[in-house]
Image (tube, helix red, strand yellow):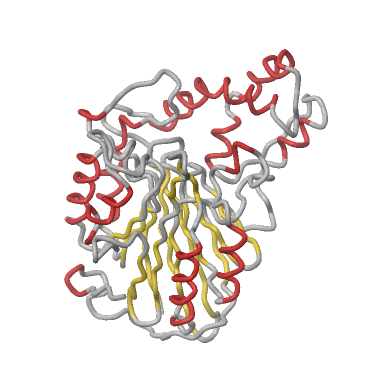
Amino acid sequence: MQIRFAVVSDPHVTLPSTLWDHPSRFHLVEVSIPALEQVLQHLVQLPLDFLLLPGDLTQHGEPENHAWLAERLARLPFPAFVVPGNHDVPQPEASGRSIGLADFPRYYRAFGYEDGQSLDYSRVLRPGIRLIGLNSNHFDAQGQLVGCLTPEQLTWLEKELAAAEEELVLLMVHHNVVEHLRGQSLHPWGRRYMLENASQLRRLLQAYGVQLVFTGHLHIQHIARRGGVYDITTGSLVSFPHPYRLVEIRSDRETGIQVHIQSYRVGSLPDWPDLQAFSREWMAQRSEPAVVKFLTSAPLNLPLEQAQALAPQLRYFWAAVAAGDPDLTFPDFPQPAGRFLERFSRCFRCPPDNQAQFRLISIFSFPISKDPPEGGTKKSSWKGRS
């Protein structure tokens, strides 16, 4: 058995007519469409089985941006699957500027949401391999967006997993399921990028042997593992380092199930000949206020004056984290702040963030064959089914 697919996360599609500026925004959305076009031009040259987009498809849920992306994905020679991110459905009900939560499936009927109503789906990609897409965007009584799964979703998911026990299940959801930053679930800034009930979901995945989860939202390249569950989060196409991934899963009787991940970057575009340098500097110029707030918040709680003095030394800190596989040292920083920041370095107990290879625990059986199904990369030959 062998499947090969791509992951493009948080593209934040922004047509020029929908672009609005803010002096401190981190998203370089001006590159959203040319960067996506360049990536798709690369992907269509490859023998891919499908494409995953784990949310934040648009910048602010604009209907014209959703419509543009749906039309563009429809022209691909392989299937694409999406889930909503917080930017895709910024409010429960539609307004003139943004779609509502219930509108999302209607835009993406051809990309997982066949009935145009449910916000979760389960599709057989080929015999023995299933994709489950989950919506993690909900609104509280005050209309504030909360990243979580409802009890009804978890009940539905358990039924799907119970019926798929003999299959390799890939799960896609926008919010993170495993911590990608040390203490992420405890820190106010990091916590908002995780599912509020991530531990509950992980227990369910562990019970049914689901090991591969694809997320976005955090805009960094990172692979984390906890309790046998790998959370593969992919950086944003509109943020440094503008990455995307190719994933290959192979299975044979001798080596079992192996996962190979290659990461790529958009290096240049017509109006940005050195996109990497430009984007890294863009991020650095906008990071100081956030760095100061980070240093003055728990658990560091540094005095404001000290944080402001240290902030210039962290000018490229977030760019290093976003790029993946960071090796961070702060010998001249006051302690324990220096040691705390060094914990953001790569975790050597996990796979590398960009070019990774690891083996899954084989607790299920699915077809092992030398050749992929005939027409496996042809859109017309693929049939999704619930």
Counting from the top left corner in percent of width and height, residue 216 is at 46, 49
Q: In this view, does 96 lie above or below 312?
A: below
> Residue drawn at (35%, 66%), measured in percent from left and top?
121
Quick check: 142 above or below 152?
A: above
Q: In this view, does 141 lie to the left or right of 91?
A: right
* Left or right of 219 on screen, residue 376: left
Tell me the quarter of the image containing the C terminus: bottom left
Residue visible at 43% across and 76% down in the picture: 160
Query: Residue reaching furthest front?
Result: 141
Q: Nearer the viewer, residue 164 or 364?
A: 164
Q: Viewed as shown, does residue 82 lie left or right of 356?
A: left
Q: In which quarter of the image is the N terminus?
A: bottom left
The image shows residue 2 at horizontal and vertical percentages of: 40, 75
Question: Looking at the image, which is closer to me, 78 or 208?
Answer: 208
Above or below, 354 relative to 60: below
Q: Quadrant of residue 202?
A: bottom right
Q: Which residue is drawn at 54% across and 58% down?
A: 231
Residue 128 coordinates in the image, percent (x, y): 40, 81
**At 75% from the left edge and 36% from the top edge, which residue is drawn?**
340
In the figure, is residue 38 to the left or right of 141?
left
Q: Which residue lies furthest to the right in this view?
A: 335
Image x and y of residue 18, in percent: 24, 30
Task: Give the total number of marks visible in the rendering.
Answer: 0
